[in-house]
Image: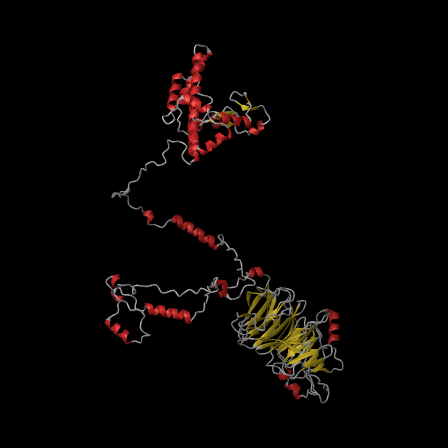
């Protein structure tokens, strides 16, 4: 393609151009630097070497080759101009249509004469013959034409020279080296001198046109002189001193959005755990060792100098004569290390007198007293707070007070729901044990046992029998609950039938709480035991008082641990020497244990219901026993004393583990359904979680209550546990135990339940979970029982 405003050399000047103008243009193109005779140029063209030898010389003399090509191009242009001039002279006399063509050519020449050579407009380029536009040329690959002209005629494809002919043309004629092929218009174009110069400038990284000056003089449009007169002399508007109402509205809108949670802070990406060398040395100093094996120890940074260290400090920093005299009287060790002095200039400042001494002492310190490198740990306090899940993500758990069970007249000491969750047992200081229906809150039955009831429990034996037991003074009473129909009643009578037993009734006055009446009547070895003689007719029937007394002979010469006696209502009474505090059953329902804290060597007794036998597993107790519990699946027995919890292996008859408690006396204990975790409450207001596989010390100590703890319980199916205290509150916790031994239990406090009042410095005395629902029962000192539901 020819450049803007130019024609290809092969086309020559326009046909209508005068001969004189062609000669003038040709003479102007020949500069003084490229002047050469036509004869000498023709001789040089004939004598020019060809082939590979010519190419070798051109590569060695690149500068001469360019000049040679330019001379050859000018010579060809002059020859073509002379030939066209002769053709114009020969065709001059002809008339007719030739005149109109000449006129048209003259108009085109005048139009081209006004073209700006420095313009980069696409309108100044030579128009294309082909008008197919952006159509790919490969579509015309198999056609005999390459497109269409403005008239719609086909542009017949010309026979293009092959590579060999092109090579011969380049060797024979130097003009062939400046010829390029235009695929779009199917024509060959020879580059002119200006075009070659433009290409050479572009290859050198210069501007294509020589008329562009890249280093034009800079004209400063703005004056550097500061004018005294301002551009605007108007006073400041009032709105600049008044807060913007628009900004106030925007701020109010943003505050409202933040409060309502519409604008939330983007959660930071979780930090990846730091990587460490699995087989690396644990010594942290090894990481900073150099190639020589020595560790770099940076020196201590000195304090930056202040005004007092200046060579000419202010007068207030200079000591007075009295202060200087005081310095002289002080011990050398107590004197200040630096005393400010004033000098007129830096040249008057003397050398530091102790410089050599301090350097020598420093060398001695490094030589004789190597220091130990200590790394400081920069810990963010927020990173120490555990990232616990939100309570709403851990539901269900009890949150609302659903019902209150009213009927007791004294403190309610103990509660126990049955395995179905339909019935609830309770016992208190009013010497009664009551049976409640959970759904309606109605008291179904009441037993008057003649002594404060400290503990109640259900027998978990499989079968339809519903047997309830209670600790009343020094007696343990096992009774048929009277629920479940005729089949349950028959099974309970068969379970509680005592062969050779004596039916007894209660005399007026009964047995007191510490067993004094039983000892006075000669129970050991032969005792007269009293019990209820009321008929079990109708619901809510109460035992009558005052009737016969029968004696039960015992084996002579043998001290008895407890006496098993038959009651007139079909139940069993087990009379011991000391006042009982707790009763707990084994999961299979045959063995149960009682605790008498003042019993010394007989504080813990284990009873077997099937054989009607009692045994003392411990000859000596290490401290005062407060609580006992059976392992749910394994033959382990938990015994809690004042400050320790001992775990005994009943199969091996040996101590398996000893858990260390806190500073307070243990008051309550509960075992996880899996048997691997234990929670213990004490009077020091703490609830301790023990992991039996981890350590003998608490895995976590929870201190959320304000007074001593009185009750603790685990849920059978849900990951929940709770604690009660004398502050009249029940704290519910979420406790997930993972099967993976590498994961620690997840303990999260979720709810604080309030529904009781403090009476005589006592609050909630016992808690128990519903067996199937996420509900919890609480027994309070205010004679009420509360049921909290989710």
Q: In this view, does 47 lie above or below 448?
A: above
> Horizontal placement of 349 versus 397: left or right?
left
> Which residue lies at the image location 40% right of the left edge and 16% below the top edge?
19
Q: Furthest-bottom residue in view?
A: 557
Of 55 and 519, the residue lying toward us: 55
Measured as percent of width and height from the top left, residue 276 is found at 54, 61
Of 305 and 729, the residue lying toward us: 305
Q: Can I make out residue 15 in this image? A: no
> Horizontal placement of 515 versus 367: left or right?
right
Q: Can I make out residue 350 in this image? A: yes
Quarter of the figure with residue 744: bottom right
Q: How is the image coloured?
A: secondary structure
Give the number of marks: 0
Quarter of the figure with residue 695: bottom right
Q: In this view, does 727 lie above or below 236?
A: below
Measured as percent of width and height from the top left, residue 528 is found at 70, 86
Measured as percent of width and height from the top left, residue 253 is found at 44, 51
Q: In which quarter of the image is the C terminus?
A: bottom right
Measured as percent of width and height from the top left, residue 12 is found at 45, 21
Quarter of the figure with residue 105: top left
Of 17 and 620, the residue lying toward us: 17
Of 619 and 128, the residue lying toward us: 128
């Amino acid at each position: 393609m020819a450049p803007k405003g130019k024609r290809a050399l092969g086309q020559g000047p326009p046909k209508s151009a005068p001969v004189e103008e062609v000669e003038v243009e040709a003479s102007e193109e020949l500069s003084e630097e490229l002047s050469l005779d036509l004869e000498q140029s023709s001789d040089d063209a004939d004598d020019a070497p060809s082939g590979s030898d010519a190419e070798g010389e051109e590569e060695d003399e690149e500068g001469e080759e360019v000049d040679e090509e330019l001379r050859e191009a000018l010579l060809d242009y002059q020859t073509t101009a002379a030939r066209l001039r002769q053709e114009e002279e020969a065709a001059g006399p002809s008339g007719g249509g030739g005149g109109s063509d000449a006129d048209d050519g003259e108009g085109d020449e005048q139009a081209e004469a006004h073209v700006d050579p420095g313009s980069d407009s696409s309108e100044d380029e030579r128009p294309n013959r082909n008008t197919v536009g952006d159509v790919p040329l490969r579509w015309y690959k198999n056609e005999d034409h390459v497109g269409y002209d403005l008239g719609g005629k086909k542009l017949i494809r010309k026979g293009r020279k092959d590579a060999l002919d092109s090579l011969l043309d380049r060797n024979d004629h130097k003009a062939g080296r400046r010829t390029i092929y235009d695929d779009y218009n199917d024509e060959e174009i020879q580059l002119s001198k200006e075009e070659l110069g433009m290409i050479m400038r572009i290859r050198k990284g210069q501007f294509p046109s020589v008329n562009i000056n890249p280093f034009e003089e800079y004209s400063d449009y703005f004056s550097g002189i500061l004018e005294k007169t301002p551009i605007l002399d108007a006073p400041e508007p009032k709105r600049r001193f008044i807060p913007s109402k628009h900004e106030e509205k925007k701020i109010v809108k943003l505050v409202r959005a933040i409060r309502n949670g519409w604008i939330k802070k983007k959660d930071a990406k979780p930090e990846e755990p730091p990587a460490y060398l699995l087989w690396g040395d644990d010594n942290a100093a090894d990481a900073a060792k150099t190639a020589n094996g020595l560790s770099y120890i940076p020196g201590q940074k000195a304090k930056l100098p202040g005004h007092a260290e200046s060579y000419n400090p202010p007068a207030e920093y200079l000591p007075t004569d009295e202060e200087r005299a005081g310095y002289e009287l002080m011990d050398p060790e107590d004197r200040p290390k630096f005393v400010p002095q004033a000098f007129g200039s830096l040249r008057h400042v003397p050398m530091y007198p102790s410089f050599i001494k301090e350097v020598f002492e420093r060398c001695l310190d490094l030589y004789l007293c190597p220091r130990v490198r200590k790394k400081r740990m920069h810990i963010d306090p927020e990173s120490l707070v555990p990232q616990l899940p939100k309570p709403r993500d851990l539901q269900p758990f009890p949150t609302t007070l659903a019902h209150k069970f009213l009927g007791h007249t004294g403190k309610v000491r103990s509660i126990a729901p049955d395995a179905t969750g339909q019935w609830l047992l309770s016992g208190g200081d009013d010497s009664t044990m009551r049976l409640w229906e959970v759904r309606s809150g109605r008291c179904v039955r009441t037993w008057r046992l003649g002594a404060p009831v400290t503990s109640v429990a259900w027998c978990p034996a499989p079968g339809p029998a519903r047997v309830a037991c209670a600790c009343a003074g020094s007696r343990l009473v096992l009774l048929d609950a009277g629920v479940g129909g005729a089949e349950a009643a028959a099974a309970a009578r068969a379970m509680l039938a005592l062969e050779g037993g004596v039916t007894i009734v209660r005399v007026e006055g009964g047995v007191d709480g510490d067993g004094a009446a039983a000892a006075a009547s000669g129970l050991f070895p032969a005792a007269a035991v009293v019990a209820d003689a009321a008929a079990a007719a109708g619901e809510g029937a109460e035992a009558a008082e005052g009737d016969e007394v029968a004696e039960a002979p015992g084996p002579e010469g043998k001290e008895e641990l407890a006496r098993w006696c038959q009651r007139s209502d079909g139940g069993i009474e087990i009379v011991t020497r000391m006042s009982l505090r707790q009763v707990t059953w084994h999961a299979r329902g045959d063995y149960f244990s009682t605790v008498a804290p003042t019993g010394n060597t007989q504080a813990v007794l284990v009873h077997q219901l099937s054989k009607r036998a009692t045994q003392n597993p411990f000859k000596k107790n290490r401290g005062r026993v407060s609580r006992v519990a059976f392992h749910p699946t394994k033959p382990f027995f938990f015994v809690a004393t004042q400050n320790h919890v001992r775990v005994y292996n009943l199969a091996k008859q040996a101590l398996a583990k000893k858990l260390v408690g806190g500073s307070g006396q243990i008051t309550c204990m509960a075992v996880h359904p899996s048997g691997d975790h234990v929670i213990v409450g004490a009077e020091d207001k703490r609830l301790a979680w023990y992991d039996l596989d981890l350590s003998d010390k608490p895995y976590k100590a929870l201190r959320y209550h304000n007074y001593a703890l009185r009750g603790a319980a685990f849920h059978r199916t849900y990951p929940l546990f709770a604690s009660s205290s004398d502050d009249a509150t029940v704290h519910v916790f979420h406790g997930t135990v993972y099967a993976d031994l590498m994961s620690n239990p997840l303990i999260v406090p979720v709810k604080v339940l309030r529904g009781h009042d403090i009476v005589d410095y006592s609050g909630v005395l016992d808690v128990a979970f519903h067996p199937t629902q996420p509900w919890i029962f609480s027994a309070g000192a205010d004679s009420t029982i509360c049921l909290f539901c989710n």
